[in-house]
Structure formats: C-alpha cells, structure tokens
C-alpha cells in the first residue's frame, strides 16, 4: 500500500463517482434513522417520564434491544416485518430502533432535569400539558437530548457499514469490495470518509444545539 | 418462518462437527474472552492512571470519540489485508474496539469519585497507592465494570461481523446462510448471537452486583454526601450514564459507549 496506489484509486473518475454515490447512500442510511428514532423516542420518553410502569417496560425493552448485535438485528427484521432479506429498509428500521432505544433514556433524563418551578410557572400561566411540553419542557431538554443524539449519530454512521454484509449501499461497500479484490485503497478511503462524516455531523449537532438554546450563551452557568 | 427456524435448530446434524452449534458457540466465546481480556489488560491500568492523575483526560475523551466512529467492518478488513490474513489480525481488531469502553469506564469512574472522599483519604494519611486501591477503585467499580460490559457486547457483535474475513463463531451461520440463501440458517445464527450477547450481559451484571462494595450500594441515600457527584445507580451504569455524570450536558457525550 503506497500513497501512489491511493492516488491512482482517487484519480479514477469512475471510482470518484462511486465514492460520491456510496457516500450519499451512507448519509441517507444513517441520518434518516436518526430523525425517525428521535421522533419515536420523544413521545415514548414523555410517557415513560410520567408513568413509572411505562418507564420500567420501556427501559427494559430498550436495554435488551440495545444488547442485540447489529448484524443479528439487520437479518432478523425481514423475518418480523416481512421485507426482503437484502433490502436497505432493514438497516433503516434497525438503526431507528437502536436510536430510539438510546434516546428514550436521554429524553427521560432531560425531562427529569427540567426544574419543577419552571413547569409550575407554565401551568400557572395557563399552559395546557401539550403546549407546556412542546414549548417549555422540550426546549429546556435540548442540551441533554443533544448529548444523546450525538452518541446515536456517531454509532449510526459507523453501523451503516455493517449493512454492506447484507447487501445495502453506503461506504461499507468499499470495505467488502476492497476485501474481495485485496485492494487496500478503497478500505482506507472508506474509513476516512466515515470518520469525517461522523465529525461533520457531530459539529452540526453542536451548532444546532447552540442555536436552539440561546439562553445558554448569555448565562454560561446553564439553562437555569 | 418460526417453524423452519425451530426445525433448523433442532436438527441433530447442526449440533455436530466443526460447523456445529456447540463448536461455533465456543469459538465465539473464545474470541470474546481473548479480546476482552487483552483489552482489559491494556486499558484498565491506563484508564485508572489517567483518572487518578487527571492528566491526559481531554486527549482520552477525544481519542475515544474518534474510535467510536470507526466502522468495525472497515477496521477488520483493513487489518486483515495489512497484517496478512490471519486470525490474529482479526483478533487485534476486536481488541482495538474493546479498548475505548474500558478506558472510558475506568477513567470516568475514578474521576467521578467524590473529591471530599479522596481528600479524606489524604487526610487520614493514605499514600497515593492506598488511595487508588482502597478508595478510588472500589468507588469506581460500577463504572469500571460497566465499561467492561460494554466492551464485551462490542466484541460479541464485532466477532459476528468478522466472520466475513473468515473468523469462525456464530457469525458464520449468518453470512454463510446469506450466501446460500438459507434464511432459517441466517435467522438461527442471528438468534444465537443475540442470545449470547444478552446472556453474557446478564452474567456480567451479576458480577457487577457482586463486586461493587456493599457500602456503595447503600450510599447516596442520604447521610454522607447529599451533594456527592451524581453516581449512576448500579443498574443504570450502562447506557448513556457511562458518560461522566449523567446530568452533564456536553463534554464526553457518552464517550466509550457505542453501538456495535
């Protein structure tokens, strides 16, 4: 493996085209589940935070689910929901489940951390529960929630590659291809691009959090 | 689908020989023990040292986060080609992936020990060594073991993926099944891997419960330190609470914890 080889690999237009396509696939397959998982986790966490029995069930289920290795979940899903075995939808569903399992804890933790007087004040001002949740509690939960989303985004981005073993696209294809042809360049490029993507998304999430929580900037002490 | 799965699992032919379930299960367990064992040998002392001295913490968190993003399949194929296609190459990959969670657990565990407890240890004249072994390590036990638990799960999952480069173990069923379009076999492999992961996790949580000093189990309810740093309850050591102090907003963002 030399730099030369790497240069030749990256120099070929067809390779670059393939790289761009797989990269796009990778972004899609990792970020869509992130969004879907968040959408699932917020109502679940809302319920779990209010009802102890729901909390026990949700946390228990989430921790068992999170224990299941990715390759296993990827191939079991078609058996459960009836999709084709080698379909990228399986990866999307599996990663959505992982994301939701991870984030539901963040949501509950974040909601637990909302100061009681704040919710009491909102109630006293006549906010109904739904409006209070959406406009008071959820915004205050953003910092803790973002911490969870960052973990989930990194793990999704790294996990999508495993999907290559069940025939889905994404940068994982570079690994299987490199392995088949005993060619190191695509593997190396795939690893670097995955790390880069994770880094960029992480930065973007931090920026988004800062945007969504302007009060943390004026008082460095936190959201109080 | 379920009947075929049961049929596959109960077929006596699948319980014998080099591709039999007992053999594959033992292989998988062996990889896990070797990789998690080596990783513990490497990562535990380093993590304890950094947590104790506080030196290099930021660097560690950064490196841990970067490693978390490393795609397992990429690492495994990379090492296979570079080190030269042996089982050792693959096992190195497993060790590399098991190191960050253990490191993070040991580091944040020691670092989170209540400052006043450490000060008290200094006050009663303990040496650095005594402080580490008699105060910091016992107090850090929940997080240290939480880290090891995460590492074991990581290795169980990665070993399955590593079947792609020719490693044995339960991943063989999944990948060979996919190649042969034998879905019951794929499903059986997936089920066995999942069961193994859950079983190991349950066993380790039992160990965690046994090893955590009794004082820690009851502490935190009231008396000693109402303002003690948030120490996650035993059962919640995994998950995002591996993060230094579950309530912390940013910082480590659960470094070390990753999904396999």
Image (cartoon, coloured by chain):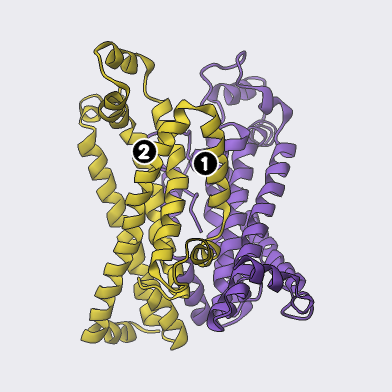
In the figure, the yellow chain has which letter?
A
Residue A136: which quarter of the image?
A: top left
Q: Position of residue A174 (x, y in %)?
A: 38, 77
Kindly report the distance in space between the C-alpha atoms of the residues bearing marks 2 and 1: 15 Å
Quarter of the picture containing the C terminus of chain A is top left
**Circle 1 sits on which residue?**
B242
B101 sits left or right of A130 in the view: right
**Circle 2 sits on which residue?**
A145
Secondary structure beneath label 1? helix
**Could you tell me which residue is drawn at 30 percent across and 63 percent down?**
A27
Total count of labels: 2
Instruction: Report which colour depicts chain B.
Output: purple
A198 sits left or right of B104 in the view: left
Question: Dot 2, crowdedness within 10 Å: few (<14), some or many (≥20)?
Answer: many
**Could you tell me which residue is drawn at 56 percent across and 21 percent down?**
B116
B223 sits left or right of A44 in the view: right
Viewer-side residue, B221 vs B202? B202
Vertical relation: B185 (above or below) A60: below
Quarter of the picture containing the N terminus of chain A is bottom left
B97 sits left or right of A46 in the view: right
Q: Position of residue B23 (x, y in %)?
A: 75, 73
**Could you tell me which residue is drawn at 64 percent across and 56 percent down?**
B197
Viewer-side residue, B127 vs B218? B218
Residue A198: which quarter of the image?
A: bottom left
Q: Which mark is residue A83?
A: none
**Could you tell me which residue is drawn at 49 percent across and 27 percent down?**
A51
Secondary structure beneath label 2? helix
Viewer-side residue, B143 vs B113? B143
Q: Does the image show residue B46?
A: no
């Amino acid at each position: 493996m030399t730099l030369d080889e790497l240069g030749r690999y990256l120099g070929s237009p067809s390779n670059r085209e393939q790289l761009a396509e797989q990269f796009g696939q990778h972004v899609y397959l990792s970020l869509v589940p992130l969004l879907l998982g968040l959408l699932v986790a917020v109502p679940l966490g809302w319920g779990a935070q209010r009802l102890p029995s729901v909390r026990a069930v949700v946390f228990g289920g989430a921790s068992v689910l999170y224990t299941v290795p990715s390759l296993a979940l990827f191939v079991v899903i078609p058996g459960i929901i009836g999709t084709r075995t080698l379909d990228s939808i399986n990866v999307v569903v599996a990663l959505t489940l992982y994301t939701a399992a991870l984030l539901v804890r963040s949501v509950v933790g974040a909601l637990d951390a909302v100061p009681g007087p704040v919710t009491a004040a909102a109630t006293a001002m006549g906010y109904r529960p739904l409006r209070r949740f959406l406009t008071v509690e959820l915004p205050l939960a953003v910092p803790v929630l973002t911490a969870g989303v960052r973990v989930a985004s990194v793990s999704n981005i790294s996990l999508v590659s495993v999907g290559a073993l069940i025939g889905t696209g994404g940068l994982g294809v570079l690994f299987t291809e490199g392995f088949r042809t005993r060619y190191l360049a695509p593997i190396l490029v795939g690893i670097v691009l995955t790390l880069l993507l994770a880094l960029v998304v992480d930065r973007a999430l931090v920026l988004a959090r800062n945007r969504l929580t302007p009060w943390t900037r004026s008082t460095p002490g936190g959201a109080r | 689908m379920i009947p075929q799965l049961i049929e596959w699992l109960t077929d006596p032919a699948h319980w014998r020989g080099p591709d039999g379930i007992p053999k594959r299960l033992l292989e998988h367990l062996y990889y896990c023990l070797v990789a998690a064992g080596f990783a513990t040998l490497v990562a535990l002392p380093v993590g304890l040292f950094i947590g104790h001295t506080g030196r290099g913490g930021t660097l560690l968190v950064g490196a841990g986060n970067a490693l978390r993003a490393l795609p397992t399949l990429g690492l495994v194929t990379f090492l296979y080609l570079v080190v030269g296609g042996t089982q050792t190459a693959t096992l190195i990959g497993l060790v590399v992936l098991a190191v960050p969670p253990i490191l993070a657990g040991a580091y944040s565990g020691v670092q989170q020990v209540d400052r006043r407890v450490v000060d008290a240890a200094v006050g009663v004249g303990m040496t650095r060594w005594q402080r580490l072994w008699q105060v910091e390590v016992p107090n850090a036990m929940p997080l240290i073991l939480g880290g090891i638990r995460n590492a074991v799960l990581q290795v169980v999952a990665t070993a399955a993926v590593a079947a792609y480069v020719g490693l044995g173990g339960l991943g063989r069923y999944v990948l060979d099944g996919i190649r042969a379009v034998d879905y019951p076999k794929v499903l059986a492999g997936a089920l066995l891997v999942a069961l193994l992961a859950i079983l190991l996790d349950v066993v380790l949580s039992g160990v965690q419960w046994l090893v955590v000093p009794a004082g820690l189990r009851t502490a935190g309810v009231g008396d000693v330190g109402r303002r003690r740093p948030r120490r996650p309850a035993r059962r919640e050591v995994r998950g995002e609470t591996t993060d230094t102090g579950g309530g912390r907003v940013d910082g480590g963002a659960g470094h070390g914890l990753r999904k396999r």
